[in-house]
Structure formats: structure tokens, C-alpha cells
Amino acid sequence: MERAHLDEDIVTTKAPPPVRRRRLAGAGVVIRRRLLVAVPVLAATSMGMFALGAASPIDPAQQYAGAAAFTTTEENLAQLRANWGVDDPLPVQYARWVGNLLRGDLGWSTSRHEPVTSVLAARAGWTLLLVGVALALVLVASALLGTLAAYRRGGWFDRALRATAYAVQSMPVFWIGLAAIALFALTLGWLPAGGLTDLTATGTDPADVARHLVLPVTVLAISQAPWFVLFVRDAVAESLRDDHVLAARARGLPGRTVLFGHALRTALLPFLTLVGTHLPELVGGAVLVETVFSLPGLGAVTVQAALGADFPLLAATTLATTVVVLAANLATDLGYAAADPRVRLDD
């Protein structure tokens, strides 16, 4: 009898509670719904890329030949077009591209003269590193600065922070990058002006890479910080007037505990949504930052692909960016639901 009760207790302990099971089931429903939405979004994105490529006046064969296009024969250019199938009807080109995509073949980069998969494999990691570190810096700095400004709203720090945020928000990211290079690299000589390593480097040293990424990461973070700082400032200022925060003050809790443990914690819930919706702009800013600082990421090759009419590479980078944005939005929804148990995932 005691053995049976013991086994029953063990089973009861190991079994997940009903609430947890419902939330896991709700998360599965959200993932399935997002996947169903992602398929038409990716299809529409790829179709749009094909339509833009067909409307482009640039001849990919002449662009690939470069200066040799002026001396080569029309037969050679026609052979290049036939090899790439660029003269085929647009639906035929799209169906062939989708078929190759499903087999893992993204095509040949005419601007890089290598497979598109090799270009993405060699450069995607650096772009993810730049965006990831910049996003982490933005989140930490905006949470701290916005909370302090809300706590002392109307004071000199609040006014100075808002004025700075509005000023930075009106500056193009490439202008901030050029100004940072002029000041910290050319005038003061503190940091390198671009690249991922020194010209004399024979390998990829982590310390050297970190030193070269200081300016790009900081520039990207500064360019995206105003949205987050102002949002946190307004959200925390509103949260400070909530009943549970006022009750925490009435209980005599320290000001730091009330500010960061109650007001900021409540304001961070909608802050998660802002991260997901703002990610496309962060990725777009990374493209410009990589171009300004000559970083070997996807941003530089995307610009090169656009200028060189390299459609396979341009389509692959655009599709990869779309996938990252969709995945980030899904992660944002799941993170919001995990942070707030009141949110129903299966609605």
C-alpha cells in the first residue's frame, strides 16, 4: 500500500501541471500559425525579387563580363545568358530557382564568382555577431538610461537625454559612422577605421577583431538606441504611477528596488514587442555600417550584389533577412508570453 502511494507521488511529481501543458500546447499552436504565415510571406518576397530583377535594365551577362563586354562577341554574351537561363520566361526562371532552393542550391554569385552558399556561410556569422552585440548593448543601455530618466523626469538628465535621443534619431547611420571614423580613427587614432583585422595580420585574433568591432558596434547601437531609450523612459514613467509600485513605496522599500524591481519589470513586457518590430531597421542599419567600415558581412556583399545585378546573391540575402525577421517576431511573441503568464498563446 505504501509502495503504491509512493509510486503515485512520483508520477504526480514528474507529470507537468495542467497550466504548463496548456502553455506548451499554445506555443505549438503559435509556431504552426507563424509557419503557415511564413510560407506565403517568403513566396511573396521571392516573387517580388524576381519581378524587380526582370524589370532591371542591367544585362547580367554584360555586367559579369565587365570591361571585356566591349570586345567580346554577341555570341559569347548570348551563351552566358543561355547558361544562366536569364532569357527564359519569368515563371520558368522562378520555378527553376525554387526547385534548386529546395535542394539546397542557391545558385552562382556572378559578382563574387563563387557559390552563393559559400558567400553566406563565410559572411553571415560576422553580420550576426555585429547585430547581436549591438542589440545587447542597446537593450542594456536603453533600459538603464531610460529608467533613470523616468525616475528623474523633468530634471536636467531627463531633458538632456531626450534632446540627445531626438538629435541622434534624425542622423543617418552612415553619417554617424563617418563622424566616428573622423574623430576616433583619423583625429585621435584610438581605434581602426575599418576592416576586421589589421593589414599585417596573418590570422583572425579575437582581441584584434574585438578592437575593430568597437566602432561599428557602437555606431549601430547609437543609431538604434533613441527608439528604445524613449520607449523605456515613457513606459517606466507610466509604471511608476501604477498601484503596485505606489504600494511598494508605501511599504518603505528602497528606491532602487522599487525602480528596477517593480517599475522597470512591468515596463519590460511591451519592450519585448518593440525589439521584434524594430529588428528589420536594425538589420538595415547593419548593412550600411558594414559598408562604411568595410566589414566582411552580408551587408557589403548585398550592396555589391545590387550594384552588380547579381540576382542569385541578392535574392538569397533578402530571403535570409526575411527568415531572420520572421524568426525574431516568433521569438518575441513566445518571450512575451513567457514573461507574462496572463497572455494566452492559443488565442
Image: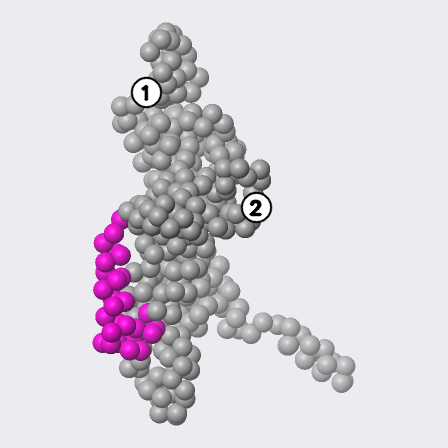
Q: Residue at the location (30% across, 23% down)?
A: 58
17 or 165, which is in the foreground?
Answer: 165
* The disc label shown at residue 59, or none: 1
Indicate whether residue 106 is drawn in magenta.
no
Residue 136 appearing in the image? yes
* The disc label shown at residue 205, or none: 2
Reply above or below: 167 against 20.
above
Residue farthest front in this picture: 188
Residue 73 percent location from the top left of the image: 37, 7
Q: Residue at the location (36% across, 45% down)?
A: 186
Q: In the image, which is nearer the foreground, mark 1 or mark 2?
A: 2
State which quarter of the image contains the C terminus: bottom left
Q: Which residues are magenta?
A: 146-172
Dot 1 falls on a residue whose secondary structure is: loop
Reply above or below: 313 against 327.
above
Residue 109 percent location from the top left of the image: 44, 28
Residue 346 appearing in the image? no
Colour pattern: one colour
Dot 2 falls on a residue whose secondary structure is: loop
270 or 140, which is in the foreground?
Answer: 140
Q: Residue at the location (35% across, 27% down)?
A: 308
Precedes in sequence: disc 1 or disc 2: 1
236 or 243, which is in the foreground?
Answer: 236
Q: Residue at the location (27% across, 23% down)?
A: 57
User: How far is the residue under mark 1 from the one under mark 2?
Assistant: 41 Å
Residue 154 percent location from the top left of the image: 22, 76
Reply above or below: 330 against 68.
below
Three-letter code for the amino acid on which mark 1 is drawn: Asp
Three-letter code for the amino acid on which mark 2 is drawn: Asp
Instruction: Report the magenta stretch's main SS.
Output: helix
* The disc label shown at residue 88, or none: none
